[in-house]
Every structure is written in structure tokens, then in C-alpha cells.
Amino acid sequence: MRNIKGGRYVLLCSGLGVCLLAAMILAVNLGAVNLRHDWIFKIIVNEIFGRELFASEWKPHLVSIVWNLRLPKVIAAAFIGASLSLSGVFMQALTRNPLAEPFVLGVSSGASTGAVAVILLGGLTFAGRYSLQLGAFAGAIGASMLVFVFSGGGNGASRLALTGMAISAVFAALTNLLIFISPDTHKINSAVFWMIGSLAGVTWEHLPPVVVIFFAGLFTGIFTRRSLDILLTGEERAGTLGVDTKTLKRALIVVSALLAGVAVSISGVIGFVGLVIPHISRTLFGPVHGRLIAPACLLGAAFMVCADMLARTLSKPEEMPAGIITALAGAPFFLHLLRTGVYKFGD
């Protein structure tokens, strides 16, 4: 499927979009409290338009379950999955290494450390309600720079993976140290959330940052798609073909860190989405970024929605952290790539 024609490509992307929509509808329907499907549709329509277009046949608390609990979580899961996938695509282009992704490279751990530091130590008050996102971004960009420097540019697969693991361990230790020295039990309980990866507690207020950053990242990918393809051939050749590699790499580091940082600030550390999804998308649609970005985002969104849905239903009425599901799916995939050496972009 490497040379998919235009009509077939549009058809496949449309199919992925339909699958994503179906997964989101199913995720809103499933939960500890069973609801009639038509009630869910009517509640959402009534809340969108702010009036009762459909007569209320349900108890008032069901409106809160659908509109305030399930729907924002499902939408957040979709954008987080898409953001992590897009971040993985950018990191892999930046390092020319399909093993690169926010979790493996320690970027997610760095973002978690930044978020936990804001929770436990305060600061960044000038950012107001977005101080947590800013702290997560600062941690993510710091981790990105450290991995990139210590891995020698990230071109060697084994060196990159080992460097990422080391940086991840350092930031995990820093996070644990912050928790250990904090005297506030309530803040500690809040901070532990960022270490397990869960969408519990997501509200409508959490959505604007991740939505805005995702579309900014998507625009960056579309605008630089040809330069990303050329970058895969090597920096020297890209430079001779007119690509400003230094500016492009800096932009990719910042945008990748933003995408991962904002996602982590909402969901905590979610692993392997940025590894598994771009690899599958590249296998199915080829390495050309003009045809890779859209399906990677759609697949990542659907994967994260399904992971959160499984987390909510497998152990109901309790809610399992979604990070457990993504790790169980992604870690064996990562080990398989390392064992078989099948981590090439392909031609």
C-alpha cells in the first residue's frame, strides 16, 4: 500500500475518520451507568443548543454524566492520541529514527516532572490557569534538548533509545524526589496522577490548550511536509536542496515538545502511542509526510479513545489508568522492533 492513489487515499482516510467517530460514539455510550442511545444523542443536542429541543425523558444527573463526564473525556482522548502521534511523527523525522517518540525519549517524563513541579512548588502564576501546561512544556523541551545533545543528534537507533531511557530515568527520579520532599499530602495525591496516565477528572476547561496546540502542530506538519521528506535523506543533502535544516530542527523540537507537554498536562504520562501509531501508518501509507500525517493523527485518536474506553469498562465501576492499556499494547511492539531490527522508514 506504499503507492496509494489519490482517490484510494481519500477513501482510506475517510474510513479512518468514520472508525474514529464510531469509537467516540461507542465510548460515550459505555460506562458504569447504562444509558439509552437516543437519550445520549438528545442530551448532547440539547446542551449544544442550550435549550430543550428534545423533551427530557431522563433524570437530571444523567445530563451531567453524558455532558460533563463522558463527552469531554472522549474528545480529550482523541486530541491527546492525535497529538502524541503527531509528536512521534515529527520526532522520527527529526532524528531519522522510527524508534523516537515522546515516551521512549523521556519527553513525557520531562513534561510530567514540569507539571508535578508546578503542582507541588507553585510558580508560573503569570500563566494563570495554563501554568500547568507551561510547566509541562518546559519539562518536555528540556528533556528533548538533553536527549538530542547526548545522543549525538539522535541518528543511531540503539544510542537514541538508551539515551532516552536514561533521561527518562533522571526525570522520573526528579519527580519522585519532589513528591518525597513535599509536606502537602493533598498535593502529593494530585501529583501521583501524572505518573500513571489517566483521563479521570478531565473537564471542558482542559480542552482548549490541547485543541489549539494540535491544530498548530498539524499546520506545521502540512506546511513543512516536503522539507520533512527531504530531511529523511540526511542533513547534508537536505541543505544542498535548499532546506534550512537548523531552523526546521528547532521548530520540530519546539512543536513536538508542545504537543507532548500539553497532552501530558491533561492525561499524565501515556506511553508508546507516538511509537506504535506512526510506525503502523508508515507501513500502510508509506514515508511521504504529505500522506502520512493525516492517517497517523486519525489512528492515534482512535487508538487513544479505544484505550480509554477499555480502561473505563474492564474494571468498572472502578477506572483503570489508560496508560496501562497503552503500555500493554505498545511495550511488546517496541521490544519486537528492537529484537528484529525492523525499524526503517523504507523507500
Image (cartoon, rainbow, N blue to C red):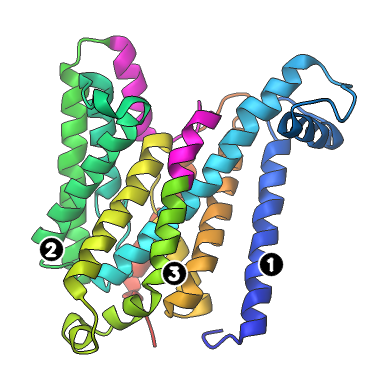
* Residue type for callout 1: Gly
The CA distance from mark 1 to mark 3 is: 21 Å
Q: Which residues are magenta?
A: 185-211
Q: Position of residue 145 (x, y in %)?
A: 15, 54
Instruction: Determine which residue is flagged by label 3.
Output: 222
Q: How dense is the environment of label 1, judged by Cα within 10 Å: few (below 14), some, or many (20 and up)?
A: some
Q: Are marks 1 and 3 in contact (CB under 8 Å)?
A: no
- In terms of secondary structure, where does tag 2 sit? loop
- Disc marking residue 15: 1
Quarter of the C terminus within the rendering: bottom left
Q: Residue at x 22, y 41 (%)?
A: 138
**On the image, which quarter does residue 119 sit in?**
top left
Q: Whole-Å distance between the Cαs marked 1 and 2?
A: 39 Å
Whole-percent x, y for residue 109 in the image: 26, 42
Q: Residue at x 57, y 24 (%)?
A: 318
Figure check: 48 above or below 109: above
Contact, mark 1 vs mark 2 (Cβ under 8 Å): no
- Looking at the image, residue 270 sits to the left or right of residue 314; the answer is left
Amino acid at pointer 3 = Ile
Is residue 329 visible in the rendered image? The answer is no
Task: Indicate the secondary structure of the residue bearing disc 3.
Answer: helix
Residue at 20% x, 55% y is 164
Which numbered dot is residue 151? 2
